[in-house]
Amino acid sequence: MVISEQQCQTALSRLKVLLEKRYPAEIGSPEWEGFQFRLEETFPTLLRHLLELYGHHFDFYYHLERLLEVMADAWLERSPDWKSTDAMREADRTWYKSGHLIGAMAYVDLFADDLKKLQDQIPYLKEMGITYLHLMPVYKSPEGDDDGGYAVSSYREIDPELGTMDDLCDLSAELRRQGISLVLDFVFNHTSDEHEWAKKAYEGLEEYQDYYLMFDSRQETEEYQEHLRAIFPDERPGNFTYLNRIKKWVWTTFHTYQWDLNYRNPEVFNAMAAEMLFLANVGVEVLRMDAVPFVWKQKGTNCENLPEAHTVLEAFNAIAKIAAPSMVFKSEAIVAPDEIKKYMGPDQCQISYNPLLMALLWEGLATRNAKLLRTSMEKRFEIPDGCAWVNYVRSHDDIGWGFDNGDAERLGINPHDHRLFLTQFYAGKHPSTFAEGELFQEDPVTGDARVCGTTASLCGLGKALREDDKEELELALRRILLMHGVTFTIGGIPLIYLGEEIGMLNDHSYKDDLDKEGDERWLHRPRFDWGKAERRTQPESVEHIIYEGFLKLTRLRSNNIALARGETEIVDPGNDHVFAYFRTTREQSILCLANFSDKAQTVAAPRLRQLGLKKVLIDIIAGQTVIAAKKLELEPHQFMVLLRQGG
Ligand code: GLC
Ligand code: GLC
């Protein structure tokens, strides 16, 4: 939408008059000037997005004024410490790209019981070099099943079992002191059915029913339903839930107790903007935008990735730039490869999960072949300037085989059969498998399924240990380090699920827990085993080997600027089992080679010369010189990091 300079200036002047009236005491202070400056700078963008979304509402300017108050109030409540961080970050807007971020994620209760005790574990995080910590939702949520906290009953209250809001603020301040950026979720597509807005809606208050997407007849929902995919098909077909008391259907993309918010209502947008800024003021440096592709619905579409979902995101980001400028957004868009990147940009999400890399790394391990990984990454790794990938092997969620069908077909792979193979492989149902995972949400209609399991279990560690098979054990350990080797060096922010660094295996106990038994994702969310963590110091223990592997990767990043923040170029090493890429800065050029095969592989010397490598090379992982006279040899699943000399 094009808006004239004039329109924009008129609106801004009106708002400034309002500010002067409402906040007379603040006018003229340097902090206030800063706020005003950012408001002026970002206002044209914000106004354009809001007009796109809500311009047709007769009371548009009323809502705009309320939003301005939300921003100004939040800024006034922001602590001096965070304001000085804001100032620092404004001088270094792409701070998250400096290469220093190494991420970890955890459930507070499973890792450390509660927020206070988590603070005591900061030394463990520091030991590993963690500088980014994503805590899974810590907010008040319904008793019992709450989708691992993703059903939020109040964004301003903490789940009492984890502590209080004061505990969270203490923790965030301490993390900041220790140089660790706090990452929290903004679960903004839905609230739980126990949120006060939901309760009021359920009591019949129309104003609050309008906060959600409610329908009087089944037929209306069916007009949408025919185009929608089911997220949890084996638990519950359909995306709507009937509320008997008010005789209405409510939109529930995920579970029946997670009600989708109605972003067509400007009041919802403003109310959520206030919740977002509240979280920013708690000390969130990276806000994880949960389930972003789903926030806008339009009849006749699949209601995912609609242009307005991007506009909502851009509008929220403009608000953050004005009232909490040190906070950046991270996209959680687990969607088709072509859609993932569209959520990234300096004005949307500055960082994003890289679910395609994640899925293709697992694909490579199963097929012992890196061709699909290479060809997909060649064209899909590049992202907009000023953005960064978050590269991970496992998260708290399932693995979906979200590669592009066309990418697969060009290699002669039948995408449907290939997905079926991968699922069977990781569910431990294929003869060639080493993996021990479980199926997740097998769709009774399409036969599609996703996979659960921890990194170690999916890499075959559990099986090898149980069968006391030394050879397999060695391979499993190499697989684990290969997978993380790539995420730590390919470019972006590496992210581990805490427990991966000590090889935590699947936890089957969720099957005995009524609140968890229906959700196989709990298989890979084990309670952190501190006894196991202790063993990281015992030479030759499995924990020690994996842990030391992690430390080495962390050190490699801090000692080699190209690994921390070089440009990435995916290359073809002339052997499809080997995944290869350069990381390059002006000072340094590094070639990483990951052998996805469980057999030794070679890269021919002429190919290496073409890539600009000499005969004598230094492998900085093994810490030794390698001579590639006729060829370079890689052991089964070896991960090599070679310095290109003179480059
Ligand atoms: C996100 C979370 C997932 C949750 C869903 C619904 O995708 O990662 O765990 O089930 O959102 O909030
Ligand atoms: C789907 C959704 C994602 C969600 C996940 C939960 O992949 O796209 O948002 O986290 O399901 O399993």
Image (cartoon, rainbow, N blue to C red):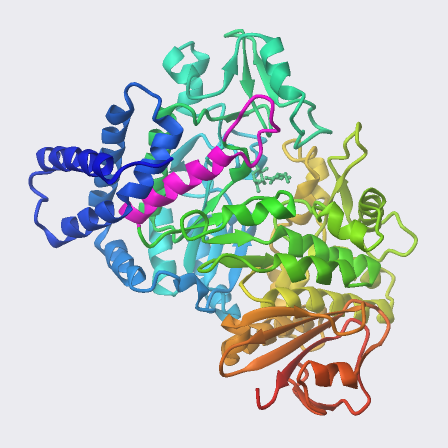
Quarter of the view holding residue 18: top left
| Residue toward you, 358 or 418 | 418
Residue nearest the observer in this picture, 188 or 120:
188
Residue drawn at x 75%, y 46% is 405
Position in image of residue 550 (x %, y %): 61, 70
Quadrant assignment for the N terminus = top left
Magenta span contains residue 77: no
Q: Is residue 459 visible?
A: no
Rendering coords of residue 194 (x, y %)? 47, 24
In the picture, measured across the screen, residue 518 lies left or right of residue 635, that is left
| Number of marks present in the image shown | 0
Q: In the image, is residue 236 above or below residue 392?
A: above
Q: Position of residue 482 (x, y in %)?
A: 71, 68
- Quadrant of the drawing holding the C terminus: bottom right
Relative to 636, is 7 above or below?
A: above
Q: Residue at x 86, y 55 (%)?
A: 433
Q: Which residues are magenta?
A: 296-324
- Whole-percent x and y of residue 103? 52, 60
Q: Quadrant of residue 593?
A: bottom right
Q: Residue at x 60, y 30 (%)?
A: 254
Where ligand 1 lies, by image quadrant? top right
Q: Residue 323 in magenta?
A: yes
Specify whether residue 591 is in view: yes
* Above or below: residue 252 compared with residue 98: above
Against 15, is 560 above or below? below
> Closest to the observer: 384 or 468?
384
